[in-house]
Amino acid sequence: MKAIDIRNKYLNYFKAHGHKVIPSAPLIPENDPSVLFTTAGMQPLVPYLLGEKHPEGTRLTDYQKCVRTNDIDEVGDNRHLTYFEMLGNWSLGDYFKDEAIAMSFEFLTKELGIPVEKLFVTCFAGDEDAPKDTVAAECWKKAGLPEDHIYFYGKNDNWWIAGEEGPCGPDTEMFYDTGKEPCSADCQPSCDCGKYVEIWNNVFMEYFKDKNGISKLKQKNVDTGLGVERMAMLLQGKETPYDTEIFAPIMQLLEEKAKNNNIQSRRIVAEHLRSSMMIICDGGRPSNMDRGYVLRRLIRRMTRHLNKLQINLDELPAIIDANIENLKEMYPDLEK
């Protein structure tokens, strides 16, 4: 299943369940100087999570273009990306845990065809701010997940907040068992060995954190995020996102043009090229400050690795054209 098919299935599924499809917000945030880029689907919707009425109602779904810059130096391994696409469904004071979890389970098992035995979930273990989320666990069992596929963890794993303060809450995270051998007798979804890969996160956003601590929001929200590149990788049985149709044609083109075939350098060029093109498409420009500096850093790192591959910079326009051709179905604005 290609990335575009996953996106379309997702939007159509939630549209059929009463959600209005809203467009992706730009990568460069509007009226939000606190962040350089849109980093999560919830970011453009914060006013509505706090109680403002959304013009499209209380059930929304979208795909959101995202850039996260804290992992730039990790790009080149088998999983890190700077730009990625997040699918989301939103309840703004409408449904809560039961319906959100039931829809998540049905979408994963029926629409995407993932076997139940491949799915594992985590829930919040509870602390002084909020109780153990036994409600979410019961919802998973009711949906059809075996009890021994449910784990409980603390705030580091199962609590979501964007930044130091704002709307927040316990979450339930969904993991795909890749079938790899467990790293130990204690191997479970919190492990980084690669056996379990997180695919979706449902945040039950009913709290607000500020300098005074945690308080209750005036409405209970659901905020979710499913990573398209990671899901495409798993459903296609690939080892990395670079092996999917999102990157594979550019990886192949770079291999053909390179005199020094270093796979890490090819990954860095392919990823940073896509990220830079998406930022520029949404109005970003290289500079020596803030988001412009991040973009310049991406281009500079990409250029360094083109040199490592011994690809002449004169080849870059042809590589850009090939990337537009490869991505234009998902992002028509790139072609424009």
Image: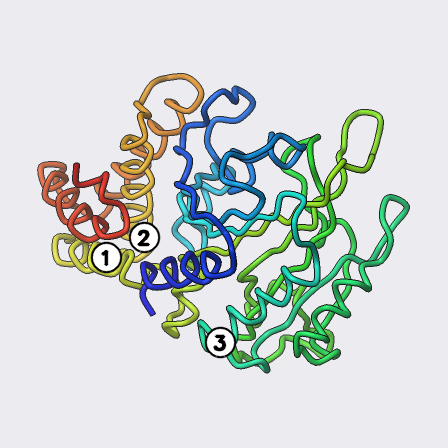
Residue at 49% across / 43% down in the picture? Answer: 71
Q: Position of residue 192 (x, y in %)?
A: 61, 63
Q: Residues within 10 Å of mark 2 (few under 14, many from 20)?
A: many
Q: Position of residue 315 (x, y in %)?
A: 10, 42
Q: Which kind of residue does numbered mark 2 sit on?
A: Arg
Please indicate whether residue 301 sits to the left or right of residue 210 in the image. Answer: left
Circle 3 sits on which residue? 110
Q: Position of residue 135 (x, y in %)?
A: 79, 63
Q: Residues within 10 Å of mark 1 (few under 14, many from 20)?
A: many
Dot 3 falls on a residue whose secondary structure is: helix
Give the image quarter of residue 282.
top left
Q: CA distance from mark 3 to mark 1?
A: 32 Å
Give the number of the disc on residue 323: none
Dot 2 falls on a residue whose secondary structure is: helix
Circle 1 sits on which residue? 251
Circle 2 sits on which residue? 267
Q: Position of residue 137 (x, y in %)?
A: 76, 67
Residue at 48% across / 39% down in the picture? Answer: 68
Q: Which kind of residue does numbered mark 1 sit on?
A: Met
